[in-house]
Image (cartoon, helix red, strand yellow):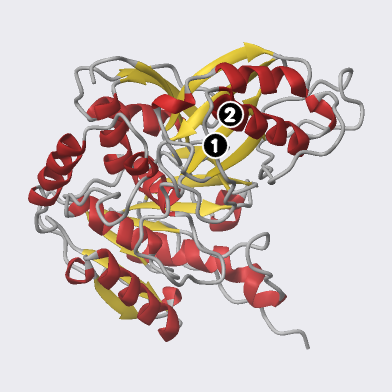
Amino acid sequence: MSDLHALFLPCPRGLEAMLVAEMQQLGSATLQVGDAVASGVPARGTLDDVMRLNLHSHIASRVLLCLGRAPVTQADEVYRLALKLPWGRWFKPTQTLRVDVTAERIPAERAPSQKAVWPATARSGRDSPARSGGFLDSLHFTALRAKDGVCDHFRARGEERPSVDREQPDVRVQLHLTASDALLYLDTSGEALFKRGWRTEHGEAPLKENLAAGLLMLSGWTPDAVLFDPLCGAGTLAVEAAQMACNIAPGLGRSFGFERLQGFDRGVWIGLRQAASAARRAPPAAIIAADIDPRMVQLTRANAQRAGVEGAIRFQQADVMDAVPPVQLAPGQVGHIVTNPPYAERIEAKGREAEDFLPRLGDVLKQRFVGWHAALLLADLQADKALRLKPARRHVVYNGPIECRLFTFILVAGRPPRKAEAAPA
Protein backbone atom coordinates (compact mmCIF):
# COMPACT_ATOMS: atom_id res chain seq x y z
CA MET A 1 0.00 0.00 0.00
CA SER A 2 1.18 3.54 -0.70
CA ASP A 3 -0.68 5.21 2.21
CA LEU A 4 1.59 6.87 4.75
CA HIS A 5 1.18 5.87 8.37
CA ALA A 6 2.41 7.55 11.54
CA LEU A 7 5.24 5.48 13.03
CA PHE A 8 7.40 5.61 16.12
CA LEU A 9 10.66 3.74 16.60
CA PRO A 10 11.82 3.57 20.24
CA CYS A 11 15.52 2.97 20.91
CA PRO A 12 18.02 2.99 23.79
CA ARG A 13 18.53 6.47 25.22
CA GLY A 14 21.54 8.16 23.69
CA LEU A 15 21.22 6.45 20.30
CA GLU A 16 18.47 8.63 18.82
CA ALA A 17 20.78 10.46 16.39
CA MET A 18 22.25 7.16 15.20
CA LEU A 19 18.73 5.84 14.57
CA VAL A 20 17.83 8.94 12.52
CA ALA A 21 20.96 8.44 10.40
CA GLU A 22 20.23 4.74 9.94
CA MET A 23 16.64 5.42 8.85
CA GLN A 24 17.80 8.04 6.35
CA GLN A 25 20.40 5.65 4.93
CA LEU A 26 17.67 3.08 4.25
CA GLY A 27 17.12 4.95 0.98
CA SER A 28 13.33 4.78 0.91
CA ALA A 29 11.61 7.44 -1.21
CA THR A 30 8.46 7.17 0.91
CA LEU A 31 9.92 7.16 4.44
CA GLN A 32 9.75 10.58 6.11
CA VAL A 33 12.02 10.68 9.17
CA GLY A 34 11.08 13.12 11.90
CA ASP A 35 13.20 14.85 14.52
CA ALA A 36 14.47 12.61 17.29
CA VAL A 37 12.85 12.80 20.71
CA ALA A 38 13.93 11.21 23.97
CA SER A 39 14.29 7.45 23.44
CA GLY A 40 12.99 7.32 19.88
CA VAL A 41 12.28 8.73 16.44
CA PRO A 42 8.87 9.52 14.88
CA ALA A 43 8.35 8.95 11.16
CA ARG A 44 5.77 8.52 8.43
CA GLY A 45 5.97 5.67 5.99
CA THR A 46 4.21 2.96 4.03
CA LEU A 47 3.64 -0.58 5.16
CA ASP A 48 6.54 -1.55 2.91
CA ASP A 49 8.68 0.87 4.92
CA VAL A 50 7.49 -0.83 8.10
CA MET A 51 8.79 -4.15 6.79
CA ARG A 52 12.11 -2.60 5.69
CA LEU A 53 12.63 -0.97 9.08
CA ASN A 54 11.95 -4.18 10.97
CA LEU A 55 14.32 -6.11 8.74
CA HIS A 56 17.19 -3.63 8.55
CA SER A 57 17.25 -1.50 11.70
CA HIS A 58 20.20 -2.28 13.95
CA ILE A 59 19.20 0.29 16.59
CA ALA A 60 15.39 0.48 16.92
CA SER A 61 13.77 -1.53 19.71
CA ARG A 62 10.44 -1.80 17.89
CA VAL A 63 8.51 -0.34 14.94
CA LEU A 64 5.18 0.99 16.24
CA LEU A 65 2.32 1.97 13.94
CA CYS A 66 0.09 4.65 15.49
CA LEU A 67 -3.64 4.04 15.06
CA GLY A 68 -5.01 6.83 17.22
CA ARG A 69 -4.34 9.63 19.66
CA ALA A 70 -6.66 11.62 21.91
CA PRO A 71 -6.52 13.86 24.98
CA VAL A 72 -7.48 11.87 28.07
CA THR A 73 -7.73 12.42 31.80
CA GLN A 74 -9.17 9.08 32.93
CA ALA A 75 -9.18 5.44 31.98
CA ASP A 76 -12.69 5.46 30.48
CA GLU A 77 -11.51 7.94 27.86
CA VAL A 78 -8.76 5.51 26.91
CA TYR A 79 -11.47 2.86 26.56
CA ARG A 80 -13.50 5.11 24.24
CA LEU A 81 -10.43 5.84 22.10
CA ALA A 82 -9.69 2.12 21.73
CA LEU A 83 -13.34 1.32 21.01
CA LYS A 84 -13.53 3.54 17.92
CA LEU A 85 -10.26 2.54 16.20
CA PRO A 86 -10.37 0.24 13.12
CA TRP A 87 -8.84 -2.88 14.68
CA GLY A 88 -10.68 -5.10 12.23
CA ARG A 89 -8.56 -3.73 9.39
CA TRP A 90 -5.45 -5.19 10.99
CA PHE A 91 -6.39 -8.46 12.65
CA LYS A 92 -9.23 -10.92 13.23
CA PRO A 93 -11.07 -11.48 16.51
CA THR A 94 -9.91 -15.09 16.47
CA GLN A 95 -6.35 -13.90 17.03
CA THR A 96 -4.96 -13.50 20.54
CA LEU A 97 -4.11 -10.11 22.00
CA ARG A 98 -1.83 -8.45 24.51
CA VAL A 99 -1.77 -4.79 25.58
CA ASP A 100 1.26 -3.08 27.17
CA VAL A 101 1.40 0.44 28.58
CA THR A 102 4.21 2.96 28.90
CA ALA A 103 4.01 6.35 30.60
CA GLU A 104 6.14 9.32 29.63
CA ARG A 105 5.32 11.75 32.41
CA ILE A 106 2.71 11.91 35.11
CA PRO A 107 2.14 15.33 36.76
CA ALA A 108 2.27 15.24 40.54
CA GLU A 109 -0.72 17.56 40.90
CA ARG A 110 -2.91 15.07 38.99
CA ALA A 111 -1.57 11.94 40.60
CA PRO A 112 -0.02 12.54 44.01
CA SER A 113 0.65 8.82 44.53
CA GLN A 114 2.36 8.25 41.16
CA LYS A 115 5.89 9.37 40.33
CA ALA A 116 7.14 10.15 36.86
CA VAL A 117 7.74 6.96 34.95
CA TRP A 118 9.66 6.11 31.76
CA PRO A 119 9.09 3.49 30.78
CA ALA A 120 6.58 1.68 32.99
CA THR A 121 5.02 -1.45 31.60
CA ALA A 122 1.91 -3.38 32.52
CA ARG A 123 0.34 -6.37 30.83
CA SER A 124 -3.36 -6.59 30.34
CA GLY A 125 -5.30 -9.32 32.06
CA ARG A 126 -8.35 -11.22 30.93
CA ASP A 127 -10.85 -9.31 33.04
CA SER A 128 -11.02 -5.71 34.25
CA PRO A 129 -11.40 -4.80 37.93
CA ALA A 130 -14.94 -3.98 38.95
CA ARG A 131 -14.22 -0.33 39.44
CA SER A 132 -13.32 2.74 37.42
CA GLY A 133 -10.95 5.59 37.99
CA GLY A 134 -8.39 7.92 36.50
CA PHE A 135 -5.63 6.24 34.54
CA LEU A 136 -3.13 8.07 36.67
CA ASP A 137 -4.22 5.93 39.62
CA SER A 138 -3.20 2.69 37.91
CA LEU A 139 -1.25 2.07 34.73
CA HIS A 140 -2.32 -1.56 34.91
CA PHE A 141 -6.01 -0.66 35.10
CA THR A 142 -5.61 1.71 32.17
CA ALA A 143 -4.09 -1.09 30.07
CA LEU A 144 -7.09 -3.22 30.97
CA ARG A 145 -9.48 -0.51 29.80
CA ALA A 146 -7.58 -0.21 26.51
CA LYS A 147 -7.86 -3.98 26.09
CA ASP A 148 -11.59 -3.80 26.82
CA GLY A 149 -12.00 -1.13 24.15
CA VAL A 150 -10.25 -3.28 21.57
CA CYS A 151 -12.33 -6.35 22.45
CA ASP A 152 -15.63 -4.44 22.61
CA HIS A 153 -14.90 -2.97 19.17
CA PHE A 154 -15.28 -6.48 17.73
CA ARG A 155 -18.31 -7.30 19.88
CA ALA A 156 -20.05 -4.14 18.64
CA ARG A 157 -19.62 -5.54 15.12
CA GLY A 158 -21.32 -8.77 16.13
CA GLU A 159 -18.05 -10.70 16.25
CA GLU A 160 -16.45 -12.67 19.04
CA ARG A 161 -14.25 -11.10 21.68
CA PRO A 162 -10.49 -11.66 21.14
CA SER A 163 -8.75 -13.74 23.79
CA VAL A 164 -5.75 -12.46 25.73
CA ASP A 165 -2.42 -14.30 25.62
CA ARG A 166 0.28 -12.80 27.81
CA GLU A 167 3.13 -14.99 26.56
CA GLN A 168 2.73 -15.68 22.82
CA PRO A 169 0.09 -13.26 21.48
CA ASP A 170 -0.69 -12.97 17.80
CA VAL A 171 -1.13 -9.20 18.14
CA ARG A 172 0.59 -6.72 20.44
CA VAL A 173 -0.96 -3.33 21.16
CA GLN A 174 0.97 -0.60 22.97
CA LEU A 175 -0.72 2.19 24.89
CA HIS A 176 1.50 5.20 25.54
CA LEU A 177 0.46 7.91 28.00
CA THR A 178 1.81 11.44 27.98
CA ALA A 179 0.87 14.16 30.46
CA SER A 180 -2.36 14.80 28.58
CA ASP A 181 -2.77 12.32 25.73
CA ALA A 182 -3.11 8.62 25.04
CA LEU A 183 -1.64 7.03 21.92
CA LEU A 184 -2.48 3.52 20.74
CA TYR A 185 -0.01 1.66 18.56
CA LEU A 186 0.15 -1.65 16.79
CA ASP A 187 3.50 -3.26 17.53
CA THR A 188 4.62 -4.49 14.10
CA SER A 189 7.79 -6.09 15.49
CA GLY A 190 6.39 -8.66 17.89
CA GLU A 191 9.40 -9.57 20.01
CA ALA A 192 11.74 -6.63 20.57
CA LEU A 193 14.09 -6.04 17.64
CA PHE A 194 17.21 -6.50 19.74
CA LYS A 195 16.22 -10.17 19.92
CA ARG A 196 17.92 -11.08 16.68
CA GLY A 197 17.40 -14.80 17.17
CA TRP A 198 21.04 -15.82 17.53
CA ARG A 199 21.63 -15.48 21.27
CA THR A 200 20.29 -18.30 23.42
CA GLU A 201 22.87 -17.83 26.17
CA HIS A 202 24.60 -14.76 27.50
CA GLY A 203 27.17 -13.72 30.03
CA GLU A 204 26.68 -12.22 33.46
CA ALA A 205 25.79 -8.73 32.23
CA PRO A 206 25.20 -8.72 28.48
CA LEU A 207 24.65 -5.73 26.26
CA LYS A 208 21.46 -5.72 24.26
CA GLU A 209 22.20 -6.18 20.59
CA ASN A 210 20.80 -2.81 19.49
CA LEU A 211 22.81 -0.98 22.15
CA ALA A 212 25.94 -2.80 20.96
CA ALA A 213 25.22 -1.78 17.36
CA GLY A 214 24.75 1.83 18.41
CA LEU A 215 28.02 1.83 20.35
CA LEU A 216 29.86 0.57 17.28
CA MET A 217 28.39 3.42 15.23
CA LEU A 218 29.15 6.03 17.90
CA SER A 219 32.73 4.75 18.19
CA GLY A 220 33.47 5.71 14.60
CA TRP A 221 34.22 2.12 13.55
CA THR A 222 33.29 1.18 10.00
CA PRO A 223 33.51 -2.29 8.43
CA ASP A 224 36.70 -1.48 6.53
CA ALA A 225 38.54 -0.94 9.84
CA VAL A 226 39.94 -3.62 12.15
CA LEU A 227 37.84 -4.22 15.28
CA PHE A 228 39.21 -5.66 18.52
CA ASP A 229 37.16 -6.36 21.66
CA PRO A 230 39.59 -7.58 24.34
CA LEU A 231 36.80 -8.00 26.97
CA CYS A 232 34.24 -9.67 24.75
CA GLY A 233 32.09 -11.45 27.34
CA ALA A 234 29.25 -13.10 25.38
CA GLY A 235 30.53 -11.48 22.19
CA THR A 236 27.66 -9.13 21.45
CA LEU A 237 29.86 -6.32 20.11
CA ALA A 238 31.89 -8.68 17.92
CA VAL A 239 28.83 -10.49 16.54
CA GLU A 240 27.02 -7.23 15.79
CA ALA A 241 30.14 -5.87 14.09
CA ALA A 242 30.51 -9.07 12.04
CA GLN A 243 26.91 -8.90 10.87
CA MET A 244 27.42 -5.27 9.83
CA ALA A 245 30.70 -6.11 8.09
CA CYS A 246 29.07 -9.04 6.27
CA ASN A 247 26.07 -6.85 5.36
CA ILE A 248 23.65 -9.23 7.08
CA ALA A 249 20.30 -7.61 7.86
CA PRO A 250 19.80 -7.87 11.65
CA GLY A 251 16.25 -9.21 11.26
CA LEU A 252 17.05 -11.83 8.66
CA GLY A 253 17.02 -14.72 11.12
CA ARG A 254 13.69 -14.05 12.88
CA SER A 255 9.98 -13.45 12.38
CA PHE A 256 7.95 -10.29 13.03
CA GLY A 257 4.57 -9.27 14.36
CA PHE A 258 3.44 -7.76 11.05
CA GLU A 259 3.51 -11.25 9.50
CA ARG A 260 0.39 -12.00 11.58
CA LEU A 261 -1.36 -8.73 10.68
CA GLN A 262 -3.55 -7.94 7.67
CA GLY A 263 -2.62 -5.42 4.99
CA PHE A 264 1.04 -6.32 4.57
CA ASP A 265 2.01 -7.56 1.11
CA ARG A 266 3.56 -11.00 1.52
CA GLY A 267 5.08 -10.86 -1.96
CA VAL A 268 6.91 -7.63 -1.12
CA TRP A 269 8.12 -9.18 2.15
CA ILE A 270 9.51 -12.23 0.36
CA GLY A 271 11.30 -9.92 -2.08
CA LEU A 272 12.81 -7.85 0.74
CA ARG A 273 14.14 -10.97 2.44
CA GLN A 274 15.57 -12.35 -0.78
CA ALA A 275 17.32 -9.07 -1.53
CA ALA A 276 18.76 -8.98 1.98
CA SER A 277 20.03 -12.56 1.68
CA ALA A 278 21.68 -11.79 -1.66
CA ALA A 279 23.48 -8.74 -0.22
CA ARG A 280 25.70 -10.80 2.09
CA ARG A 281 29.44 -10.39 1.57
CA ALA A 282 32.77 -11.37 3.12
CA PRO A 283 34.01 -9.03 5.87
CA PRO A 284 36.50 -6.47 4.49
CA ALA A 285 38.64 -6.35 7.67
CA ALA A 286 39.54 -8.43 10.69
CA ILE A 287 37.27 -8.68 13.74
CA ILE A 288 38.85 -10.13 16.88
CA ALA A 289 37.11 -11.13 20.12
CA ALA A 290 39.12 -12.02 23.23
CA ASP A 291 38.40 -12.75 26.88
CA ILE A 292 40.36 -14.10 29.82
CA ASP A 293 37.58 -16.60 30.58
CA PRO A 294 37.62 -19.59 28.22
CA ARG A 295 33.89 -20.11 28.85
CA MET A 296 33.16 -16.64 27.45
CA VAL A 297 35.30 -17.32 24.39
CA GLN A 298 33.38 -20.54 23.81
CA LEU A 299 30.07 -18.71 24.31
CA THR A 300 31.09 -15.98 21.86
CA ARG A 301 31.97 -18.60 19.27
CA ALA A 302 28.62 -20.35 19.78
CA ASN A 303 26.72 -17.07 19.43
CA ALA A 304 28.69 -16.18 16.30
CA GLN A 305 27.92 -19.60 14.81
CA ARG A 306 24.18 -19.14 15.37
CA ALA A 307 24.41 -15.66 13.85
CA GLY A 308 26.14 -17.06 10.76
CA VAL A 309 29.36 -15.08 11.28
CA GLU A 310 31.70 -17.55 13.00
CA GLY A 311 34.07 -17.38 10.05
CA ALA A 312 34.19 -13.58 10.20
CA ILE A 313 35.59 -13.42 13.76
CA ARG A 314 38.92 -14.49 15.25
CA PHE A 315 38.64 -15.80 18.81
CA GLN A 316 41.33 -15.55 21.48
CA GLN A 317 41.61 -16.48 25.13
CA ALA A 318 43.78 -13.77 26.66
CA ASP A 319 44.08 -11.36 29.56
CA VAL A 320 43.40 -7.78 28.49
CA MET A 321 46.44 -6.70 30.49
CA ASP A 322 48.59 -8.75 28.12
CA ALA A 323 46.87 -7.41 25.02
CA VAL A 324 48.86 -6.29 21.98
CA PRO A 325 47.56 -5.37 18.52
CA PRO A 326 46.17 -8.67 17.20
CA VAL A 327 46.88 -7.86 13.54
CA GLN A 328 49.23 -5.65 11.59
CA LEU A 329 47.31 -2.79 10.06
CA ALA A 330 47.55 -2.21 6.34
CA PRO A 331 48.81 1.22 5.16
CA GLY A 332 46.07 3.74 5.79
CA GLN A 333 43.95 1.25 7.76
CA VAL A 334 42.60 2.14 11.21
CA GLY A 335 42.34 -0.17 14.19
CA HIS A 336 39.47 0.23 16.66
CA ILE A 337 39.16 -1.15 20.17
CA VAL A 338 35.49 -1.15 21.19
CA THR A 339 34.69 -2.81 24.49
CA ASN A 340 32.41 -2.87 27.52
CA PRO A 341 34.61 -3.31 30.61
CA PRO A 342 32.99 -4.56 33.82
CA TYR A 343 31.84 -1.86 36.20
CA ALA A 344 30.48 -1.86 39.74
CA GLU A 345 26.85 -1.16 38.90
CA ARG A 346 26.90 -4.06 36.45
CA ILE A 347 29.17 -6.61 38.12
CA GLU A 348 30.15 -6.36 41.79
CA ALA A 349 33.86 -5.50 41.91
CA LYS A 350 35.90 -5.55 45.11
CA GLY A 351 39.47 -5.22 46.24
CA ARG A 352 42.64 -3.52 45.09
CA GLU A 353 42.68 -5.37 41.77
CA ALA A 354 39.32 -3.83 40.83
CA GLU A 355 40.51 -0.38 41.88
CA ASP A 356 43.61 -0.67 39.70
CA PHE A 357 41.78 -2.07 36.67
CA LEU A 358 41.16 1.18 34.79
CA PRO A 359 44.61 2.72 35.45
CA ARG A 360 46.27 -0.49 34.28
CA LEU A 361 44.00 -0.67 31.22
CA GLY A 362 44.89 2.93 30.39
CA ASP A 363 48.58 2.01 30.50
CA VAL A 364 48.00 -0.92 28.14
CA LEU A 365 46.17 1.24 25.64
CA LYS A 366 48.58 4.15 25.47
CA GLN A 367 51.74 2.02 25.57
CA ARG A 368 50.81 -0.73 23.10
CA PHE A 369 48.07 0.64 20.84
CA VAL A 370 49.53 3.92 19.62
CA GLY A 371 47.69 5.06 16.50
CA TRP A 372 44.58 3.03 17.30
CA HIS A 373 41.16 4.39 18.27
CA ALA A 374 39.43 3.14 21.40
CA ALA A 375 35.85 3.35 22.69
CA LEU A 376 34.97 2.18 26.19
CA LEU A 377 31.48 2.02 27.70
CA LEU A 378 31.69 2.80 31.43
CA ALA A 379 29.26 3.76 34.17
CA ASP A 380 31.92 5.81 35.98
CA LEU A 381 31.23 9.20 34.42
CA GLN A 382 34.77 10.33 35.28
CA ALA A 383 36.49 7.14 34.15
CA ASP A 384 38.79 9.05 31.79
CA LYS A 385 40.62 10.36 34.88
CA ALA A 386 41.29 6.83 36.13
CA LEU A 387 42.40 5.79 32.65
CA ARG A 388 44.65 8.86 32.44
CA LEU A 389 43.52 9.35 28.85
CA LYS A 390 42.00 12.44 27.28
CA PRO A 391 38.79 11.51 25.48
CA ALA A 392 38.04 12.85 22.02
CA ARG A 393 34.30 12.51 22.76
CA ARG A 394 31.99 11.54 25.61
CA HIS A 395 28.64 10.11 24.51
CA VAL A 396 25.85 9.85 27.05
CA VAL A 397 24.10 6.48 26.65
CA TYR A 398 22.01 4.27 28.89
CA ASN A 399 22.63 0.57 29.44
CA GLY A 400 19.11 -0.21 30.60
CA PRO A 401 18.55 2.13 33.57
CA ILE A 402 22.27 2.80 34.10
CA GLU A 403 23.57 6.13 32.84
CA CYS A 404 26.91 5.51 31.14
CA ARG A 405 29.50 7.25 29.02
CA LEU A 406 31.00 5.93 25.84
CA PHE A 407 34.48 7.44 26.00
CA THR A 408 36.27 7.57 22.65
CA PHE A 409 40.03 8.06 22.41
CA ILE A 410 42.63 8.56 19.71
CA LEU A 411 45.62 6.81 21.23
CA VAL A 412 48.94 8.57 21.05
CA ALA A 413 52.26 7.76 22.70
CA GLY A 414 51.84 8.15 26.44
CA ARG A 415 53.95 8.46 29.52
CA PRO A 416 55.79 5.40 30.85
CA PRO A 417 53.68 3.02 32.92
CA ARG A 418 53.17 3.96 36.56
CA LYS A 419 55.67 2.46 38.98
CA ALA A 420 54.25 0.00 41.44
CA GLU A 421 53.84 1.42 44.91
CA ALA A 422 56.37 0.28 47.44
CA ALA A 423 55.14 -2.31 49.92
CA PRO A 424 54.71 -0.96 53.46
CA ALA A 425 57.54 -1.82 55.81
Q: Which quadrant would residue 114 be assigned to in this image?
A: top right
Q: Position of residue 270 (x, y in %)?
A: 16, 43
240, 353: nearer the viewer: 240
212, 77: nearer the viewer: 77
Tag shown at residue 155: 2
In this picture, residue 107 sits left or right of residue 44: right
Tag shown at residue 299: none
Tag shown at residue 160: 1
| Three-letter code, disc 1 | Glu
Mark 2 or 1, nearer chain start: 2
110, 99: nearer the viewer: 99
For the residues labelled 2 and 1, the Cα–Cα distance comes to 6 Å
Residue drawn 60% across and 23% down? 82
Residue drawn 77% across and 30% down? 116
Q: Residue furthest right?
A: 112
Q: Position of residue 348 (x, y in %)?
A: 69, 70
Res 36 seen here: yes
151, 343: nearer the viewer: 151
**Element under disc 2:** helix
| Three-letter code, disc 2 | Arg
In this picture, residue 32 sits left or right of residue 366: left
Placement of the N terminus among the 4 image quadrants: top left
Q: Is residue 277 above or below residue 10?
A: below
Q: Position of residue 98 (x, y in %)?
A: 57, 43
Res 369 seen here: no
